Image: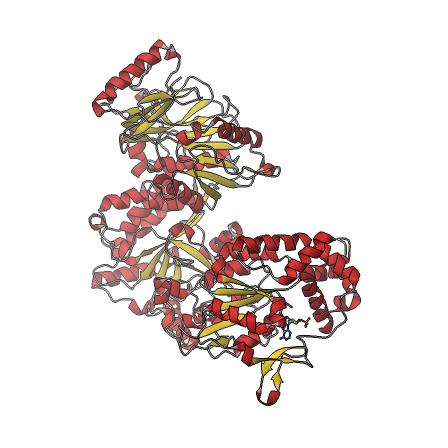
Amino acid sequence: MLKLWKVVRPARQLELHRLILLLIAFSLGSMGFLAYYVSTSPKAKEPLPLPLGDCSSGGAAGPGPVRPPVPPRPPRPPETARTEPVVLVFVESAYSQLGQEIVAILESSRFRYSTELAPGRGDMPTLTDHTRGRYVLVIYENLLKYVNLDAWSRELLDRYCVEYGVGIIGFFRAHEHSLLSAQLKGFPLFLHSNLGLRDYQVNPSAPLLHLTRPSRLEPGPLPGDDWTIFQSNHSTYEPVLLASLRPAESPVPGPVPRRTRLPTVVQDLGLHDGIQRVLFGHGLSFWLHKLVFVDAVAYLTGKRLCLDLDRYILVDIDDIFVGKEGTRMKVADVEALLTTQNKLRTLVPNFTFNLGFSGKFYHTGTEEEDAGDDMLLKHRKEFWWFPHMWSHMQPHLFHNRSVLADQMRLNKQFALEHGIPTDLGYAVAPHHSGVYPIHTQLYEAWKSVWGIQVTSTEEYPHLRPARYRRGFIHNGIMVLPRQTCGLFTHTIFYNEYPGGSRELDRSIRGGELFLTVLLNPISIFMTHLSNYGNDRLGLYTFESLVRFLQCWTRLRLQTLPPVPLARKYFELFPQERSPLWQNPCDDKRHKDIWSKEKTCDRLPKFLIVGPQKTGTTAIHFFLSLHPAVTSSFPSPSTFEEIQFFNGPNYHKGIDWYMDFFPVPSNASTDFLFEKSATYFDSEVVPRRGAALLPRAKIITVLTNPADRAYSWYQHQRAHGDPAALNYTFYQVISASSQAPLALRSLQNRCLVPGYYSTHLQRWLTYYPSGQLLIVDGQELRTNPAASMESIQKFLGITPFLNYTRTLRFDEDKGFWCQGLEGGKTRCLGKSKGRRYPDMDTESRLFLMDFFRNHNLDLSKLLNRLGQPVPSWLREELQHSSLG
Ligand code: A3P
């Protein structure tokens, strides 16, 4: 058996090499392995579903398949309950191109994945978590890394795949040193590499086809001459894509007629060794491979990672009436628009162009163009309409909401006078201004003047990469991600398309635009008035796109008006309803469309995050004594704390948050901060915090979690919490899972913040450890000057405040306070440093046991971080080990 390995050989020996292998193959009697037969008989041409455009050119040259269709074998269902829906991708390096292409498709499809550098030998990542498989699918960027795994790792991976019903996708990328022909080690499969191919065809019998329309043929040469084809006579292999050798190519070994189509993508049905695989004889640079790759993922995961067939497309034509003279639509252009719309309606149910208007520019073109404006209005009922600003001004330039609303009213007046429908509930803002980053005034004015429910933007969370664009809901307005289609105000002539007209065609025929629709269930495209005058590139683009999509895919294209479309979007992606605010100054584009009246300097440099009852108010108070440190203003509604990141306040947006901070007199030396002690144990806060304040420092205070729980219980009693008043501390902490709801809820709030290591780990997934300070709450209480010194060092605050002189111990209070003149002190209020009976022994022992493992984990974490272990933790661990 030949093993695939790298052989360096001079180019002129290549043909000789192929000949020798041919002879070996024959002498070994491997005549039995045949190419997958798909005859090239021209008679078998299949009628095309569409008469026009790209599809007809592809189908016309296409011979149909003659191989009797293989009855589709249902894939062995992956054991849904037993694997996580996560793809394990073995890449060649962090920057390898194919690896990045694989990841880009998984990300665009919103599939979860994890990348690992493909181990040369050994070092297989952990595949199971107790009895659960960690991965639903394995992808090898380089198939050879899989077949050449050492025996132990290979056995481990294969056994995992068999036991958990997990499939493998592998890519064979030929290069100049690849063997020309060889058997894939351990498989009844032969590879022939470095071939030039032509006339690509989809095998209609391939079971994995889902989005891909079967039987299609792409005539002409395939890019490059480094293709690999697969040959086998084992029934486990089913071709997926096939192509013919280019006339100049020498034949591959075996009795294969020259015109036979040879498989470059095969599906291994698992009949050989119980593992299903899909093998690609090239990378993903060829567009059709991307399509088939998406199907392969769906098939091998039993459709757990699968895109639905429905695709909703909405085409906005922005700037109606706005274009410069000479670029606007004339009567004939409007007629063409209507004709294309009608044509598209036969392919895309309900297809309707959505026109965005700024009334101020009505009739500002040439005479012919003004007639075009009138023609649009004459046929206004045949389109959908949405308002822009009256004079196309950017909303973020209006700080005054009523002035902004007045501008909108002018446009509304124009719409009413001209009978333009005003009830579609959709609007967009020029240059995304005010949509994201949020300009609260815009949302309010939109709602009050127009009753807007939906808008769209390319800017959330950022323009690039486009695959990360998402939607969110703010102030009752659904914001949808908008996609780029490559048409801008200045792209008006086909031959002058940036990079050449082939760029546009490439984007449509399997490139970026095609992939956008393939991978996004809902696409809103923004085009401009100028794209429909002159060469009418808008019409050309969307008609060609729709035809190409229908030719090669089984996607069900359709259009919905904006409001139902937005509802559909958030039905599909409910997790996106809640936004994730970023710092507008971290993205130049965002900064440019953010009000000049607002400044990112009003965001805090550090947060004191809790947990509650550990001394956070004392730190807040002591820090506020520092001249360079400024706290947020107290919030009247949430016990002085802002509590922005963890609750409903977050949805009020960052303008609301920033209003709690003064504008610093010197942004580089002043330190703004806020303290909300409930942030520490919240699931959502670290992620939200890191999105808005990625460079913020985080301060947390830890005391013995048993004491913290007891202090919290006393705090609740002092605030008249009926559950805390009804139950003793011991009853609260020891309540069983059958206890009344109120008691269990109290128990949770009392104990869960004390799972220190769990919460810290969460913070550390979003913030680097160097940005996190853990203050010893015990030390803060007994020697606050020492704690304040380390806090100042950590924050890098100057000048250094000497707290040994600033603070004084107050005997009456029993705590450290601010020292005032005349021996007086200013201490924290009555609610801090309360007096209450000591905790009873039974509760103490119970909690010592309850928190033992959490405390142990905390000490391990602190060791790992190189942070000192506080004295209370050391004592606690000693006691519990003695106990
Ligand atoms: P008790 O009131 O139960 O004693 P927080 O501010 O995070 O809610 O924490 C309150 C706790 O801070 C108090 O709990 C108290 O033990 C502790 N603390 C530490 N230093 C303090 C100080 N200088 N003054 C008042 N309380 C202080």
Image point (53%, 41%), residue name: 85
Choose between 728 and 865: the one closer to the eye.
865
Image point (22%, 60%), residue name: 368
Rendering coords of residue 671 (x, y %): 46, 73
Regarding residue 851, the answer to whether it shows in the image is: no
Q: In which quarter of the image is the N terminus?
A: top left
61 on left or right of 480: left
Rendering coords of residue 227 (x, y %): 31, 29
187 on left or right of 546: right
Question: In the current view of this chain or complex, which residue is farthest to the bottom?
Answer: 822
Q: Is residue 198 above or below residue 537?
A: above
Image point (53%, 25%), residue name: 274
Q: Is residue 133 above or below residue 691?
A: above
Image point (26%, 51%), residue name: 536
Q: Name the colouring of the figure.
A: secondary structure
Q: Quadrant of residue 52?
A: top left
Choose between 684 and 757: the one closer to the eye.
757
Q: Quadrant of ligand 1?
A: bottom right
158 on left or right of 542: right
Total count of labels: 0
Regarding residue 99, the answer to whether it shows in the image is: yes
709 on left or right of 208: right
Rendering coords of residue 516 (x, y %): 38, 46
Rendering coords of residue 184 (x, y %): 40, 23
Choose between 458 and 638: the one closer to the eye.
638
Choose between 498 and 608: the one closer to the eye.
608
